[in-house]
Image (cartoon, helix red, strand yellow):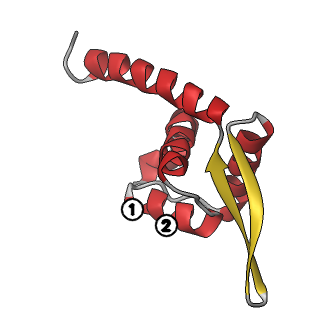
Amino acid sequence: MKDDLNNRDLYSGMIRLHILHHAEHEAIFGAGMAEELARHGYKISPGTLYPILHSLEKRGYLKSEEERSGRSVRRLYKITASGRRALKIAKLRVRELFGELIEGK
C-alpha cells in the first residue's frame, strides 16, 4: 500500500510488539523476522529492522547470541524477563485501544 509508506511511524510500535511476541515463543533472527512481518503486510528493510532489534536489545527487552552453522553465523534474539513484562503490559494497552478503535467503546 502506498499509504503505508506515509504512515510508517504509526506502525513502528506495532512492529516492535510483533517482534517481542514472536521472540516470546521462540528465538528469532533478522531475515526470518522480516519474512514474518512481510506476511502481515509490513515490508521492512534490513536497514530498518536491524536497528529495531538492536534497540530492543539495548533496552533490555531482547538478548542475542551468535549461532554458527557451518561457515555462516546467525544472530539469534530471545526475549528477556523485562521484555516479557513489557509485552504483557503492552498487550493490555493494545486490548484497550482495540476496544476504542474497533468496538467503539
In this rendering, position of residue 23 left or right of residue 80: left
Q: What is the residue that sits farthest to the bottom in this orientation?
A: 70
Question: SS class of the residue under badge 1?
Answer: helix
- Label pair 1/2, CB-CB below 8 angstroms: yes
Locate residue 97: give its quadrant. Answer: top left
Q: Amino acid at mark 1?
A: Arg
Could you tell me which residue is drawn at 54 percent across and 67 percent down?
Answer: 32
Could you tell me which residue is drawn at 52 percent across and 33 percent down?
Answer: 10
Locate residue 101: give its quadrant. Answer: top left
Q: Amino acid at mark 2?
A: Glu
Give how far across and how far down residue 30 sits, in percent. 64, 63
Q: Which residue is mark 1?
A: 39
Count the labels in the image: 2
Question: SS class of the residue under badge 2?
Answer: helix
Give how far across and how far down residue 7 sits, in percent. 51, 39
Q: What is the residue that sits farthest to the top in this orientation?
A: 105
Give how far across and how far down residue 49 sits, in percent. 65, 55
Give how far across and how far down residue 34 sits, in percent. 55, 63
Checking the image for residue 81, the label placed there is: none
Residue in the foreground of this view, choosing between 21 and 98? 21
Q: Is residue 87 above or below residue 22?
A: above
Residue in the foreground of this view, choosing between 55 and 78? 78
* Mark 1–mark 2 distance (CA, rounded to whole Å): 6 Å
For the residue carrying disc 2, how many other residues have a C-alpha within 10 Å: few (<14), some (14-19), or many (20+)? some
Could you tell me which residue is drawn at 69 percent across and 47 percent down?
Answer: 52
In this rendering, position of residue 87 left or right of residue 67: left
For the residue carrying disc 1, how many other residues have a C-alpha within 10 Å: few (<14), some (14-19), or many (20+)? few
The C terminus lies in which quarter of the figure?
A: top left
Q: What is the residue that sits farthest to the front in this orientation?
A: 81
Q: Which residue is mark 2?
A: 35
